[in-house]
């Protein structure tokens, strides 16, 4: 998809051939890169991005369950077993159960 | 006494190793393999990044930043996609981030540093001067565009990539790329008229 404007297309064609900063110099490249790699540690977002979606999908229900457990424990309303937990949280639903 | 040139032998062995092997090693955390890949991809990264940087030191920093992004992103690379495509995708998105983060600072700075832009082998030649002037004019117009528009024009018109490839590299839809390119060129044409640089 090229421009059909004659002035812009001429400008682009000429500008394309210009190397504004010349060629990269190989002097010191490896030393600089290795020293940068030595201090480069993956950030939180990189770690998250490296996790597969399967892992994320598997860990989400576990995280929700942990949150529910901690929330009920914090309120000193720890129910007996899974049945008690479901009954307790069903009370919050706007449905006539 | 028998002397064996180990460096030449090592280089020969290195050239015989296919790229996929280097990639596999780098993905598993081998820093030497990554440095080897970085050296081979650096000219392409340099060429693409030179369309966004304003000075040679800034370009060197940008390329270094892109290489670090590649190193950090390697664990997420899936071998079912071509490695060179993945490299260029990370590079293009890194350049876009660079454009966005530097936009305000750029607006308050002068456009061209002549000492950086005049390192052609023969600056007195008409052809070279014509190319440099064209580049400076295009840079002037690109500076006035939004980061997204600038990225699209750079990929389509300066790097001569197709719409599909540009869409894949940026992560935007093909229709989005087309619409942006059309609007950006229209703005560039208006800026040209405004600046009296039509001839």
Image (cartoon, grey):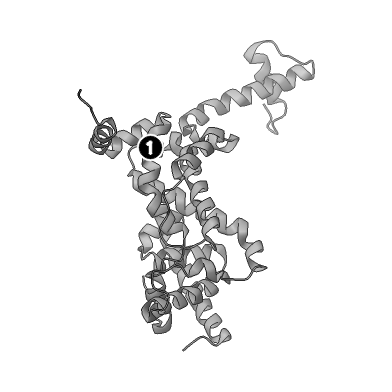
Question: Residue B197, percent across and down?
Answer: 51, 85
- Going by the image, does B63 lie left or right of A89? left
Residue at 52% across, 83% down: B192
Position of the N terminus of chain A by quadrant: bottom left
Residue A33, relative to residue A61: is it above or below?
below
Q: Residue at x 36, y 79 (%)?
A: B127
Residue reaching furthest front? B1
Name the residue carrying label 1: B78
Image height check: is A56 above or below B60? above
Residue nearest the observer in this picture, B56 or B169: B56
User: Can you tell which quarter of the image residue B134 is in?
Assistant: bottom left
Q: Position of residue B73 (x, y in %)?
A: 47, 39
Disc 1 residue crowd, few under 14, some 14–19, many 20+, Cα 10 Å: few
Residue B147 visible in image: yes
B176 sits to left or right of B160: right
Q: Position of residue B116 (x, y in %)?
A: 52, 66
Image quarter (top left, top right, bottom left or bottom right) of the C terminus of chain A:
top right
Outermost residue toward the right?
A75
Front residue of B48/B119: it is B119
**Foreground of the two, B133 or B155:** B133
Q: Residue furthest left?
A: B2
- Visible in this render: residue B171? no
> From the viewer's perspective, is residue B105 above or below residue A62?
below
Q: Chain of mark 1?
A: B
> Element under label 1?
loop
Image label count:
1
Q: Which x, y percent locates residue A10?
A: 38, 80
């Amino acid at each position: 998809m090229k421009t059909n404007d004659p002035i812009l297309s001429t400008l682009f064609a000429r500008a394309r051939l210009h190397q504004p900063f010349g060629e990269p110099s190989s002097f010191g490249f490896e030393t600089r890169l290795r020293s940068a790699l030595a201090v480069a540690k993956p950030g939180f977002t990189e770690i998250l991005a490296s996790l597969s979606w399967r892992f994320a999908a598997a860990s989400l229900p576990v995280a929700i369950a942990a949150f529910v457990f901690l929330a009920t424990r914090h309120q000193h309303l720890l129910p007996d077993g899974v049945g008690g937990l479901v009954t307790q949280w069903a009370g919050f639903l706007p449905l006539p159960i | 006494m028998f002397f064996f040139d180990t460096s030449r032998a090592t280089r020969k062995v290195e050239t015989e190793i296919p790229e996929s092997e280097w990639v596999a090693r780098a993905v598993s955390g081998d820093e030497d393999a990554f440095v080897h890949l970085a050296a081979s991809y650096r000219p392409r990264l340099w060429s693409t990044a030179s369309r966004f940087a304003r000075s040679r030191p800034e370009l060197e920093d940008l390329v270094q930043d892109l290489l670090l992004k590649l190193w950090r992103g390697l664990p997420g690379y899936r071998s079912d996609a071509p490695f060179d495509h993945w490299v260029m995708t990370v590079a293009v998105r890194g350049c876009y981030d660079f454009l966005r983060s530097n936009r305000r600072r750029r607006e308050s700075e002068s456009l061209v540093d002549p000492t950086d832009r005049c390192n052609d082998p023969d600056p007195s030649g008409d052809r070279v001067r014509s190319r440099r002037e064209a580049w400076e004019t295009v840079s002037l117009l690109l500076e006035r565009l939004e980061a997204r528009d600038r990225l699209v024009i750079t990929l389509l018109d300066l790097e001569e990539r197709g719409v599909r490839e540009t869409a894949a590299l940026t992560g935007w839809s093909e229709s989005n790329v087309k619409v942006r390119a059309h609007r950006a060129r229209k703005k560039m044409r208006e800026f040209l008229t405004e600046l009296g640089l039509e001839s």
